[in-house]
Amino acid sequence: MPRASSPPFDGLTDTWGRRNRKLANRVCPKCNTTFRPTRETSRYCSRPCAWANNGGRNKKPETWWKSTKGYINGRIWIGGVQMHVKKHRRIMEQRLGRALRPHEDVHHVNGDKSDNRIKNLEVIAHGAHSTMTNLKRHSRAKAEGRS
């Protein structure tokens, strides 16, 4: 009995000749290289080509979010370099007109880590800040009545 012939294959083959490709190769409009798209909407061969196409118009000057610990963190551009900063430290550096020293911490007076008003922020030494913060903590031994 003769073998059943398979229907003609209209799909694409990979580099080893397997018939498993769904998307045809495309040409990158930025660098004119041929690339294999990973999804239907892929237009550029790489992220640098996609970023170069927008002319820098989508480059945000700063982005802020609230961290899981309650601080306002952000990404800002300083001198053409993107840096991660904490907003309360950035505000205090701008207020002082200098960078904070390694032994200096910025303390939130009212305890609200997202309240970054100047009147709520103060610069104190790291050791003093640690002492102040640890005095507010309640140990398990004190809570159970043991000393």
Image (tube, rainbow, N blue to C red):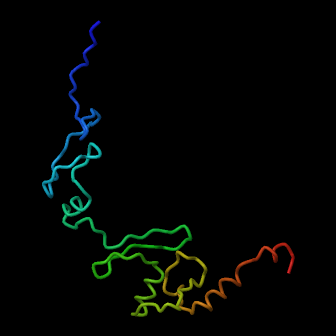
Residue at image position (18%, 46%) is 26
- Considering every residue shown, the one lying at the far top of the view is 1
35 lies left or right of 144: left
Tell me which corner region of the image, top left, top right, bottom left or bottom right, holds residue 22.
Answer: top left
- Considering every residue shown, the one lying at the far front of the view is 1
133 lies left or right of 25: right
Tell me which corner region of the image, top left, top right, bottom left or bottom right, holds residue 126.
Answer: bottom right
Observer-nearest of 28 and 147? 28
Whole-percent x and y of residue 139?
A: 76, 76
Whole-percent x and y of residue 38?
A: 29, 46
Whole-percent x and y of residue 82?
A: 34, 75
Residue at image position (24%, 39%) is 23
Q: Is residue 109 above or below residue 69?
A: below
Number of labelled discs?
Answer: 0
Q: Quadrant of the N terminus?
A: top left
Observer-nearest of 69 and 121? 69
Whole-percent x and y of residue 84?
A: 41, 75
Q: Quadrant of the C terminus?
A: bottom right
Residue at image position (46%, 73%) is 73
Tell me which corner region of the image, top left, top right, bottom left or bottom right, holds residue 56.
Answer: bottom left
Observer-nearest of 42 and 9? 9
Q: Is residue 131 above or below residue 61?
A: below
